[in-house]
Image (tube, rainbow, N blue to C red):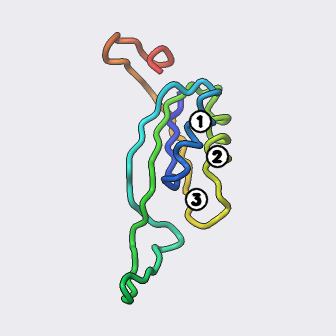
């Protein structure tokens, strides 16, 4: 099993979700987060005063999948979230040792 974590632009969330549904992704965890990468935030002008936004709003998606579909899920997230502009985000893939569905006690792939 793999845990795929992606940090993307908020307006791309619906598109990512729509693209993952045909792959059999039945669930995901979504969190609103803030962060910065190479762009180091951005400068904005508000009421004539310039200020720097150090942390930009992002969305973090966490998806647990079976190992055989993990690469396809990663490719789909990248394709759906990509705008070609700075700040598109990142995808991380972790090995997932164990999963348990609390309601039924099912484990590992059955719990996904």
Determine the CA span between mark 1 and mark 2.
9 Å
Are circles 3 and 1 on residues that touch, CB within 8 Å?
no
Residue 83: x and y in percent read: 65, 58
Are circles 1 and 2 on residues that touch, CB within 8 Å?
yes
Residue 111: x and y in percent read: 44, 17
For mark 3, give the secondary structure. loop
Residue 17: x and y in percent read: 55, 37
Specify which label sits upstream in the sequence, 1 or 2.
1
Residue 90: x and y in percent read: 55, 54
Specify which label sits upstream in the sequence, 2 or 3.
2
Determine the CA span between mark 3 and mark 1.
18 Å
Foreground: 5 or 47? 47
Compared with 54, 9 (above or below) is: above
What mark, if any, has residue 18 been given in the picture? 1
Foreground: 26 or 40? 26
Specify which label sits upstream in the sequence, 3 or 1.
1
Residue in the image at 39% along x and 60% along y: 34
Report which residue position mark 3 lands on: 88
Binning the other alpha carbons within 10 Å of mark 3 as few (below 14), some (14 to 19) or many (20 upward) gives: some
Report which residue position mark 2 lands on: 80
Compared with 85, 9 (above or below) is: above
Closer to the camera: disc 3 or disc 1?
1
Residue in the image at 64% along x and 27% along y: 23
Residue in the image at 39% along x and 67% along y: 55
Closer to the camera: disc 1 or disc 2?
1
User: Residue pushed farthest left?
Assistant: 103
Residue in the image at 45% along x and 81% along y: 43
For mark 2, give the secondary structure. helix
């Amino acid at each position: 099993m793999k845990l795929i974590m992606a940090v993307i632009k908020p307006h791309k969330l619906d598109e990512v979700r729509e693209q993952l549904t045909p792959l059999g992704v039945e669930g995901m965890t979504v969190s609103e987060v803030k962060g910065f990468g190479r762009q180091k935030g951005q400068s904005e002008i508000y009421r004539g005063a310039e200020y720097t936004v150090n942390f930009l709003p992002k969305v973090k998606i966490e998806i647990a999948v079976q190992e055989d579909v993990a690469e396809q899920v990663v490719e789909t997230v990248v394709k759906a979230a990509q705008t070609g502009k700075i700040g598109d985000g990142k995808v991380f893939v972790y090995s997932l040792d164990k999963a348990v569905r609390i309601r039924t006690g099912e484990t590992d792939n059955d719990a996904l």
